[in-house]
Amino acid sequence: MRIKQHPILDFEPKRPILFRYNNQEVIGYEGDTIAAALHAAGIKVLSFSMVEKRPRGFYCAIGNCGSCHMTVNGVPNVKTCLTMLEEGMEVVSMETKVK
């Protein structure tokens, strides 16, 4: 879900950015973080709790909670709520082994 209209703020169209999440193509927009782009694309579960394996979503958006850690371009434990989206990024959830 994206906000497209607002009574006060102006939302200029942004350049679309194509990236891969768990081997699927996803489109985000310039200025998005990885987590925000995934959330806007309808991907709500970003990780799972270690013990109970409960789903974790986009929570704090300031890098404190650890709910959004993923492997980005081969680097594990990247905070996707703080990492800006770039063209061609490879993002893999920590529980997924993509072949």
Image (cartoon, grey):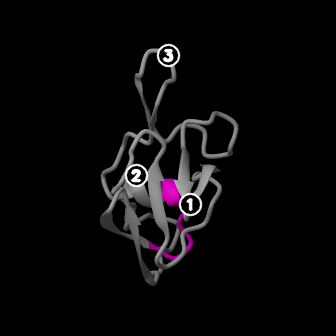
Q: Secondary structure at mark 3?
A: loop
Amino acid type for the residue under numbered disc 1: Gly
* Mark seen at residue 74: 1
Q: Is residue 21 left or right of residue 10?
A: left
The residue closer to the viewer here, 73 or 32, is 73
Relative image position of residue 24 (x, y in whole percent): 29, 63
Is residue 31 shown in magenta? Answer: yes
- The residue wearing badge 2 is 39
Residue beneath disc 3? 51
Q: Residue furthest top?
A: 52
Residue range highlighted in magenta: 29-36
> Which quadrant does the N terminus fall into?
bottom left
Q: Earlier in the sequence, mark 1 or mark 3?
A: 3
Q: Amino acid at mark 3?
A: Val
Instruction: Locate the C terminus and report the quarter of the image it occupies.
Output: bottom left
Q: Amino acid at mark 2?
A: His
Whether residue 49 is situated above or below residue 43 in the rendered picture: above
State the residue lying farthest toward the front. Answer: 99
Residue 49 lies, with reference to residue 32, above or below; the image says above
User: Are the two marked residues, 1 and 3, in contact with CB atoms closer than 8 angstroms?
Assistant: no
Residue 71 spot, x, y in % from top left:
54, 53
